[in-house]
Amino acid sequence: MLYEQFDLADTDPLEGGLRWLVPGLVAAAAASGALLFYLIGQSLFAGIFLVGFVAMLVAAFIIDRRTPRAVEVAPLLLPDMELVGSAISLSPDAVALTDAGGVLQSVNSAYRSRFKSARPPLELGANAKATKALLKAKDTALRDGDAELPELALAGGKTSLVVTRVGGQKDLLFWRFAGSGKIDPIDIAAQRIAGPTGERLAAAGVLAALIDEDGQLLAANRPFADRALNGSATSGQPVQFGKLVEGSPEGMLRLVAEGADARPLRAVHVPLDVEKENGAGTLLMFESNEGPSLANSTNVQVLLEMLPIGLALVDRDGRFLTMNNAFRVAGGLASEEMPAYPGDLVVKEDKAAVADAVRRNARGPAMSGDLPVRLKHQPAEPVALTVAGLRGLGDAAVLLLLKDNSEEAKLKRQVAQATKMQAVGQLAGGVAHDFNNILTAIIGHCDLMMMRHTPGDSDYDDIQQIKSNSNRAAGLTRQLLAFSRQQTLRPQVLQLPDVVSEVSHLLKRLLGETVQLVVKHGRDLGPVRADPGQLEQVIVNLSVNARDAMAAGGGGTLTIQTYSIKAEQVADLGSDILPIADYSALSISDTGTGIPAAILGKVFEPFFTTKEVGKGTGLGLSTVYGIVKQSGGFIFADSKVGEGTRFTIYLPVHRVEEEKSGGRRAAKGVENESELWGTGTVLLVEDEPMVRTVAERALTRHGYKVLTANNGEEALEIVDQGEEIALLISDVVMPLMDGPTMVREARKSRPDLPILFMSGYAEEQLRKSIDIANVAFLPKPFSVQELAEAVRKALSDK
């Protein structure tokens, strides 16, 4: 087929040229035809043209011999393009003829059909690399006569190329593209399944997968990848389709990734080759719509409404199908309101987490998990949202369970708070114990120095000031011990109205003129057993806090009330903290600004204060809490912002019992009470050198012979020597062997030996752990006089 017609240049005929010109042209055409047919593999036609070429040469020779010639001129051989086009059209391969620069001269129909146009071969490269390879093949063919590319990426697919230099002047190039160039239908199908066709199937709820003849998964659309492959791509290692699905007795398929409860799928196989039913093809899977959806059935809805917990069903797209009334109440929804998605219930920050949890449970295997979220109508308190995957309930793919865990969170905070206060209390008790040893040494040395100085002496006032400051420091340690509930209390049986009356005069001076004090007493209050000094401190601390709360409003009313609470009334309260018993109650209420609910549960924490910097230590209410709990009582705080705060203390009623030997002991010992001098040998056991030195000097000054020991082992060695010992004074906590262990060993040989324990820890705590009869206790820090009094009393009770 002729592609382009060339114009021949006009020339003057040579003399005698008409005799050989025509045979020469015909011979040239025959030679070109023979060469072309040989290149395209048509040997028969090439032979015919070769015979014609030889005949024309013979004819030209005869003519040339018969006629004289004046001038010899080289023949001009031009190809017959129409004949060339007809020749190359017989080739099944795509072929083209170009000039040396690659300009197209002629192509066949196979070339046009394959490349969809008549572009030159140099423009057919699929990429820059292929174009570069075409240019190199052209240059190689012009230089060497031919060039071959076994594999070349072109616009019509991969192929092989042979380029040959042809023509009488060797200035033409013959391009032959072998092979059909058709794209594999499996590749086309894979592109469609993974592309727009697969998306359209997904929109219709159809799962699509392309499988080859060996059962390997080649491509899949998004729903199938999400549900069967957990969203992973199919590239990489081949996956057997048979491992992703399993058959059901009904002739349907189930996805293995969704578990044994997976909803069955109907499947349709569409083969790529209609003649091969079991060959490669596309498998279309969709859920059966036979019968009504179980998720929307009346029975399921009635069952959901009967359950007391909030439940809702969600489909695979993450939309609500149904929910019960409890779910609406927990989610803050109206009676008929139903949002579109679960994420519409929560705050903006939790939407992504909820949507992701619903998607994973809807697409993957059936599982469940709790997710803490904050609801829109209640963002301050987190709630637990349980997300569980469902299978076999029709359209329902996810079950949501919404429960209000505010009480659980509150209990967790209370436990954490109690644990924290216990840890801080233990730390405070340990610090107070060590500090008490230091204060004991300071106060003792001050007493010893004051024995050598009289009032009016230049050093007397300085020593007195040191002792006064030490006593203030001792008060601070008592606060720490009260906070940690390890303070040494001196409880008495008393009436709450008497304690309030004693402290009322002090309160009037503390509250000032802007605060009105109102005191009310109830009837039939039972006696309580507590330390009156500590109860006064409780009342003062609460009253001062109330005064500060009312100062912003210019003052107010402070009401202190005592009343009786019977066991029946406690039972009616239904408190989980307050045991059922008879109580005497003390309430202190004010008309101040109140305490916000967010911080009401923190008021008893150590070092927590709402006052500005420099106006509060944060130990006031924690000390109150420690004193009340150590006294066996309970304290509660109630407050409303703008109305005031009320603290209520419940102390159990003490049942008085007569002590058998109480009268005899009370009569004994008051004789010569002021006499602190004594005689006898005292064994002093103390691991702190500074405390041991002070106690030894104080006892020596009061007439006692003192034997000292650094620890329990040394003390037992002294006891075993057999010397008469009138009193054993020992610290409780010591290294190697503590005081109680040493006393038990000593009493094995001396059962009647009097014991006086001294310690910076609380007496009540020590008595519970020591469990030794007939022992006395002296709390640290103590003065020289208090030590002498304790020793005298221990010897008199012998």
Image (cartoon, rainbow, N blue to C red):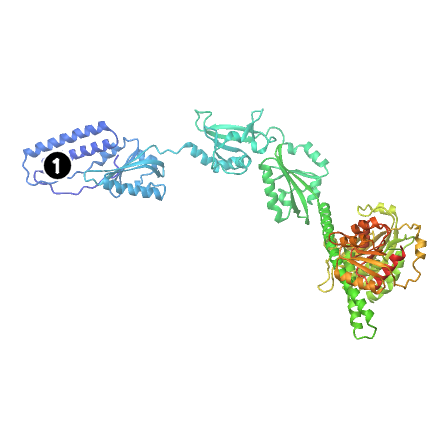
Does the rendering let one see residue 144? yes
Does the rendering let one see residue 642? no
Compare residues 430 and 496 and report the one nearer the observer. Answer: 430
Give the quarter of the image for residue 623. bottom right
Question: Residue at 31% across / 39% down in the picture?
Answer: 118
Compare residues 373 and 54 and report the one nearer the observer. Answer: 373
Q: Is 299 situated above or below 611? A: above
Q: Is 292 situated above or below 577? A: above
Amino acid type, callout 1: Leu
User: Crowding at label 1, few (<14), some or many (≥20) Cα neighbours within 10 Å?
Assistant: some
**Which residue bears the numbered disc 1?**
21
Report whether 176 appears left or right of 294.
Answer: left
Percent across and percent down for residue 478 are 79, 59
Question: Residue at 43% across / 32% down in the picture?
Answer: 186
Report whether 203 appears left or right of 636.
Answer: left
Secondary element at image label 1: helix
Q: Is 405 situated above or below 648? A: above
Percent across and percent down for residue 334 are 69, 44
Compare residues 472 and 778 and report the one nearer the observer. Answer: 778
Question: Residue at 62% across / 28% down in the picture?
Answer: 291
Give the quarter of the image for residue 617. bottom right
Percent across and percent down for residue 430 are 74, 56
Compare residues 780 and 784 and report the one nearer the observer. Answer: 784
Q: Quadrant of the C terminus?
A: bottom right
Q: Quadrant of the N terminus?
A: top left
Q: Is 428 situated above or below 373? A: below
